[in-house]
Image (spheres, helix red, strand yellow):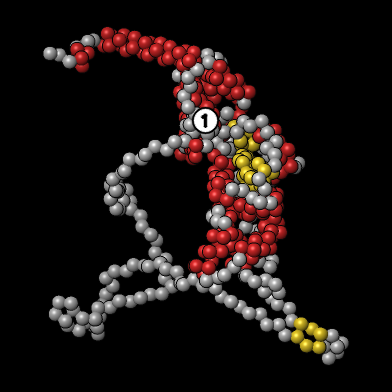
Amino acid sequence: MTTRREELEQLDKETLIDGYLLLEKRVKTLERQMSELSRALGIKPAKTTENSSRPPSQDQKANVAKRAKKKRGAKKGHTGTSRHRVEADEVIECRVVACRDCGWDLSDLPQHMAGRHQVIDIPPLGAIVREVIRYGRYCPCCKTYQRAQPPSGFEQGRIVGHHLEQLVLYLHYAHPLSYGRVARILSEVCDVQLSEGALVNIVRRAESRLKQTADVIHEQVKQADVVGSDETGARVDGVSYWQWVFQTPKLAYYVIRPSRSAQVIADVMDDSQPQVWVSDVLSSQMCHPATTYQICLAHQLRDLQYLIDTHHCEWATEIQALFRRAIHLHNLRNDLSDKRFHLFAQAYHWCLDKLLKTSPLSDDSQRLWRRFHKHRDALLLFLRRDDVPPTNNASEQALRNSVIYRKVTGGFRSDWGADLYANLISILETARRQGRSIFEVLNSILAPYPDFSWIAK
């Protein structure tokens, strides 16, 4: 008895091609009928993070299958890597005293190095208490009483030093820990007893210096050629606010405002006019002051995926594939010659114009088709400028920690707390983007004479 595969192997090439084309036609007919039936019944696929801007936290998480443990060491054909050896603070030499087999004394004989390794540890954590004693006396000349002034950082009324202030700011904001948990960590780890009120006073004392630093970052962002922006929700004193970010590859400036309108952009950018604005197509973002703009293709890819899932739209499939190829070309920019890159870029522009001349059938597809026509020059601008990214992912990633902070803390109790958080997170994110130590940055800011030279455009 012959199998179906054996029957097909006996057919000639022309017959197989005709059969394949017939099957392809039937598949398209069935897909069209399924799409029409789904529309008639009002059935649409659920929106997920793959086909919409739905936040990942709202997706149903599937169980992940357990993976086999990987073998230690480098893969076959790859160079292995290990921890780099650093200069040791203390060297412990271990010499052989006696032979373990016969007991012969080896301590006085020459020995060679048989191996070495490093163990990293930290000293026991504890507070250093410095007591300030001020002396004074009457001046024998003018008979006035003179009292010695304490050095900077030891002013009267101060109970904690700069390093402890930095740690409190870091724990409370960079790692969203409540004042109660910060107080508990200081008590259990460092044996430092501070009330929540004392922690609040520490934060408030740094308020003016943090604002001064954030203002410097703000001015640098306003001078940038390419600016990316996004916004997310925030809660201030039980009221819904919006947290905005304005960022470049080296800078990030945050504000928290009660509005999501374009007035926030106007207030932040003032009279500045960057060359390119990178964002989604929110109406307020489209009121940017830049001369041109690039819309986020990551959002467009998800919207196109929804059309593919819902309507099996061939137009959406083709233009989605084109966007993916264009993003891949952008990532290969440094690996290709200028001539080869520009040839590919011209081909993608031509393909996009060709696809936009074809009007899709469904209403959802036509809505996206009209959007692409409206923002045609903003779809592939990143292929013309190497300093423009194809997506607004950098802005979304800059807001990720703030979303976690909002979920953990529930928001802010006052406007000054929200503004202080925005200023501090501007400093922390800018330091992270420039590869700088957060503690060194905070130390330079809270020093008696603050240093802002590390803020680079």
Q: Is residue 269 above or below residue 183?
A: above
Q: Is residue 190 visible?
A: yes
Q: Which residue is outermost to the right? A: 142
Residue type marked 1: Ser
Is residue 50 placed above or below 232 in the rendered structure? Answer: above
| Residue 82: x %, y % from top left | 36, 57
The quarter holding residue 437 reads bottom right
**Residue 171, image x and y in percent?**
55, 59
Q: Residue at x 64, y 52 (%)?
A: 421
- Which residue of the protein is positioned furthest toward the bottom in this rendering? 140
Residue depicted at x 56% and y 64%: 183
Q: Quadrant of the N terminus?
A: top left
The one nearer the camera, 267 or 97, is: 267
Q: Residues within 10 Å of mark 1 (few under 14, many from 20)?
A: some
Q: Does the image show residue 206?
A: no
Per the image, the residue denoted by label 1 is 52
- Residue 297 place in picture, x, y as percent: 54, 31
Which residue is rendered at x = 53% and y = 64% of the image?
Answer: 184
* Residue 324, position as x, y percentages in the image: 47, 30
In this rendering, position of residue 369 left or right of residue 80: right
> Which residue is pictured at 58% across the width and 76% down the height?
129
Please identify the quarter of the rendering in which residue 364 is found: top right
Asked which secondary structure carries label 1, the reply is loop
Q: Is residue 22 left or right of residue 39?
A: left
Q: Quadrant of residue 424?
A: bottom right
Report the number of discs: 1
Farthest residue in the left direction? 1
Q: Nearer the viewer, residue 119 or 68?
A: 68
Q: Report whether 438 appears left or right of 290.
A: left
